[in-house]
Amino acid sequence: MVETNNFQPEDQESNTSIETLLTSKIVDQVENVRVKTSGPAIRISRTLVYGLTAIIIILIALPFLFVGVSRGLIEIFDLWVFSERSRAVWFVYLLSATLWSTIGFLIWRRRPKGAATPKEGVSHMEGKDV
């Protein structure tokens, strides 16, 4: 018996290779479009998600950091500087108040001119029922 399944005409092979070539070209072009369109979108969304996560973690960690630094300073001043713990606590409170007041003053100085003055409409409305 002669097998005829292995026999393929010459033009059948060329059609298969052309189909494969065209399919690979189309797939490559679709991949290029996908990379150029969804690539930046994926990068932006990942940056946004990781950035928001980092901001939330930092905002949660900052109060613990301030409390820990204050507690550490109280212990340091209690052991090495003052003889009474209450004096060390009040000194750390004074340092903290000075630091935050200085930061607030520096921020206040950077405000735009006239930002703290009341608007004209507010002063005219005194005594009137609105």
Image (cartoon, grey):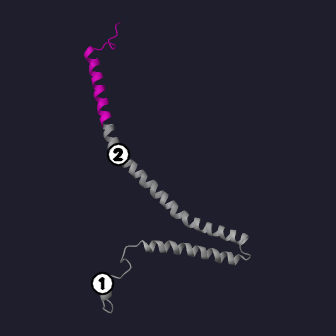
**x, y percent for residue 25:** 29, 31
- Considering the whole magenta stretch, tell me its main secondary structure: helix
Q: Secondary structure at mark 1?
A: helix
Task: Name the residue furthest top.
Answer: 1
Q: Quadrant of residue 75?
A: bottom right
* Closer-to-camera residue (1/50): 50
C-beta proximity under 8 Å, tags 2 and 1:
no
Task: Name the residue furthest right.
Answer: 83
Ranked by sequence position, the earlier of labels 2 and 1 is 2
Looking at the picture, does residue 31 appear above or below residue 56?
above
Looking at the picture, does residue 39 appear above or below residue 21?
below
Examine the structure image and report whether residue 99 is included in the region drawn in magenta.
Answer: no
Q: In the image, what residue occupies the spot 44% across and 74% down?
A: 108
Q: Secondary structure at mark 2?
A: helix
- Residue ID for mark 1: 120
Give the amino acid at mark 2: Ser
Q: Is residue 37 left or right of residue 96?
A: left
- Which stretch appears magenta? 1-29
Examine the structure image and report whether residue 27 is included in the region drawn in magenta.
Answer: yes
